Amino acid sequence: MDLPRVERELKKRLPYQYSWGRKQSNSWDFDTNFIYQTYSFESLLKQISGFDQQLKDYALNRWYNFWSAMAAEDIFSSHENVEPNINSYDKLIDFKINGIPFDHKTSVFPKGFNQSYEYAKEHKKEIITWLYENQSQEGRKHLKNRLFIILYDDVTRQHWKMKSEIMQLKLAIDTYVKNFSTKHLCRLNFGSGEVLSDIIWLTKEKI
């Protein structure tokens, strides 16, 4: 994957409003599944030109989130100790690190956590538990191993824009994988066996 090109395309989406208009739904997902084969932002705009505003916003967000996630998976998979899952329909495993399977999810810092960024970084297990318990009810909901990439922008508070910072994301993932150790993982149990999880923070802090 041409990561600099992906970053350039994603950043073309930044001037547009970021509004879902409604929660993620399976029916709207079906109507916007063309985003998986749409590589350029200009092509995306052409395909959604006839949509009403809510569905247009929905498609913009899905496209943006999908290609940011694909870039992250590509970065993980570039490492020798990471084995990508060749089954693209598997919603539980994106890759294995040192033989341990993980799904990965990129999320903005959650307002609903009701604690500060500083608190969250000091209480990793607490925020990971919250993320599992408050995950979306659609699509990729599960209680299996997951690596969270959490975005936090203390300058503009527009955390979502950091999904376009692909080269910064690469540095964060490269550092994490290089220093990967099972002793750093959080171990949780939601009633159906042990779950392994961790957080990679991508932050923009005030100077």
Image: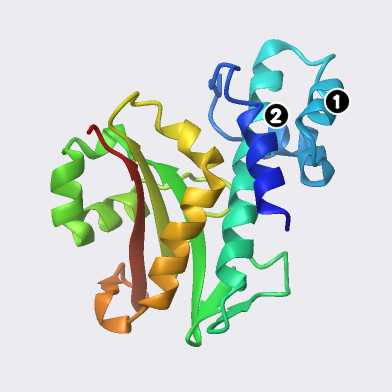
In percent of width and height, residue 138 lies at 56, 45
**Would you identify the image quadrant in which residue 125 lies?**
bottom left
Q: Is residue 171 left or right of residue 75?
A: left
Q: Secondary structure at mark 2?
A: helix
Q: Amino acid at mark 1?
A: Gln
The residue carrying mark 1 is 47
Crowding around mark 2 (Cα neighbors within 10 Å: few <14, some 14 to 19, many 20+) is: many
**Would you identify the image quadrant in which residue 74 lies?**
bottom right
Crowding around mark 1 (Cα neighbors within 10 Å: few <14, some 14 to 19, many 20+) is: some
The residue carrying mark 2 is 59
The answer, for residue 102, to whether it is visible in the render is yes
Q: Is residue 55 left or right of residue 31?
A: left
Comparing 161 with 185, the one in front is 161
Does 102 appear above or below 28?
below
In percent of width and height, residue 26 lies at 67, 40
Q: Residue at x 62, y 72 (%)?
A: 78
Number of marks in the rendered image = 2
